Amino acid sequence: MTPLDSPLLALTGGYWDGKFHALTGATITVRDPASYEAIATLPRMGAEHATLAVAAAVRALAAGPPDLERRKRALIAVADAHDANCDELARIITAENGKPLAEAIGEVRYAAGFYRDAVRHVDGLAPRTLAEEPRGCTWRVHARPAGVAALITPFNFPLAMLAKKLSAAIAAGCPVVVKPAEKTPLSAIALFGLLHRLELPPGTLNLVYGDAPAIGRVLCEHPAVRVISFTGSTAVGQWLAAACAPHMKRLSLELGGNAPFVVFADADLDHAAEQLVANKFRCSGQTCVCTNRVLVEASVAEAFVARVAKRVAALTLGAGAAVGTDVGPLIDRAAFDKVSRHVSDAVERGARVVVGGVTASGGDGVGAFFPPTVLSGVTAEALASQEETFGPLIAVGTFSGEAEGIARADDTAYGLAAYVFSADLARLERVAQALHFGHVGLNTATGPTPEAPFGGMRMSGVGREGGEQGVHEYVEWQTTPIGLP
Ligand code: NAP
């Protein structure tokens, strides 16, 4: 084993009651996706540890929420800690997730942005008195912390997905139990090492990972946990929703997508191609807002595919830590196999391989490097159109006319991100209004930003992260009418 040597990982284990707990017993192994080498061995925590973490959070809750100024200072301190340790945090992200270092640096900055932006929304949580005095009362409105919040995050943005949740929870005054993905817990551990130095009241921040179903059950069933904020697959989101139903918890679920990228014939094809490539290969195609289905108006399909192919052929596949890498490995062999299946299935249904294609996986000791791939002539029935590929595959199909473009784009049970390109602004507005996606990029394929609410419609989830709306996911509004003398 080659352990990941980092000053930010001097202390590991679980974290509750204001300190790290080195535990003995079962372990999990974290691997570098570029080499499959083990880079850390950590305790595999379960129900017992989750219960201790929740109990610590309950004690913090009972001590009362920090005042608004203290929350703002804590948020700024967390953002500053990201900035001051940006390079080291990025190195850890790349080591466990595989994404290129430049992307990892971008993730740390993006994460810091959520803490900074949340500061802007804290003052809005001060109690206020209504100007009206209905029913013979003075009416006060309070933003109470909703309770202990459980924050469950996926592997693809080990720091940023946590930042979206943790920034809002701190702003709202909720103690948290964080549960990162088993494949990428090191970024969260490193962050907790930094948070530890902030000397927040013990129990405010707690961390467990390991046996996800056992931990999940405790978080869903413990009466003090009032918010479950989860980012991950729709299947696990459904499981959590069902487990929480008897306990009537507040759920914020950021789930999977099947993002269409619609190019009308009047679009600037060079701009659209550039945006598509920038959007599609981030984290090797493993982001929830990555384009999944490219739909091009038939009359410009060939010209558009040629522009995309030229750019994709120039991308360099390699280890995230290597200089010059544009696209890193997939998280594991199962992810590699899924992309292979989608490519083979599309080709069997008549698609043409324009760039890349199915390749042998690396074998033992080598990461799951799937080549950036472009397919044209992909049908609506292909797996690549039906399911989230979560890999470096651009699957291009065609349509004719606005009505068919909208129908094809909206033909999915998911509703997270969509992108539309056209020179006609009125058309862009019409199409956005007709689509059932929480995030619709018009002549841009940018993803979310801390300042704006982001989340899914339909099977892509409930709730929003970012902006004022993200903070309100952790707030219970309480009204106190006070009888006038
Ligand atoms: P996943 O398998 O659903 O895992 C996500 C998290 O849930 C991990 O921490 C996992 O822990 C945990 N988990 C699994 N089963 C659980 C249970 N029974 N109780 C409690 N926690 C449980 O998802 P993933 O493969 O890591 O992430 C990819 C998916 O996330 C994609 O579908 C992607 O679209 C989606 N995503 C959505 C957004 C968004 O904003 N909507 C953003 C990013 C990703 P273990 O790892 O320990 O099993």
Image (cartoon, rainbow, N blue to C red):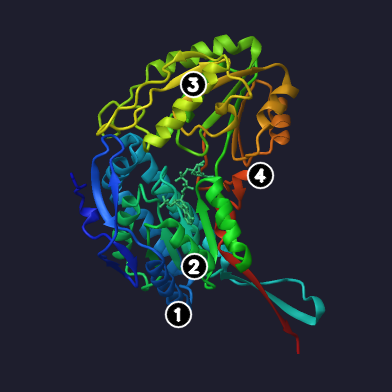
Tell me the tag on residue 174.
Answer: 2
Q: Position of residue 263 (x, y in %)?
A: 61, 21
Q: Amino acid at mark 4?
A: Arg
Q: Residue at x 61, y 11 (%)?
A: 300
As measured in the structure, the alpha-carbon distance from the residue carrying label 4 to the one carrying label 2 is: 28 Å
Q: Indicate the amino acid at tag 2.
A: Cys
Q: Residue at x 48, y 34 (%)?
A: 390
Percent coordinates x, y for residue 429 in the rendering: 70, 31
Which residue: 54% across, 30% down?
Answer: 292
Q: Which residue is under mark 3?
A: 344
The alpha-carbon separation of the residues under discs 1 and 3 comes to 58 Å
Whether disc 1's CB lies below 8 Å from ligand 1 is answered no
- Residue 203 occupies which quadrant of the picture? bottom left
For the residue pair 47 and 194, the one nearer the viewer reads as: 47
Regarding residue 322, the answer to whether it shows in the image is: yes
Quadrant into which the C terminus falls = bottom right
Q: Does the beta carbon at disc 3 come under 8 Å from ligand 1?
A: no
Tag 4, which secondary structure? helix
Q: Position of residue 193 (x, y in %)?
A: 28, 60
- Could you tell me which secondary element the residue under label 2 belongs to? loop
Q: Which mark is residue 458?
A: 4
Q: Position of residue 30 (x, y in %)?
A: 29, 47
Instruction: For the residues labelled 2 and 1, say whether their Cβ atoms are less than 8 Å apart.
Output: no
Q: CA distance from mark 3 to mark 2?
A: 47 Å
Labels 2 and 1: the sequence-earlier one: 1
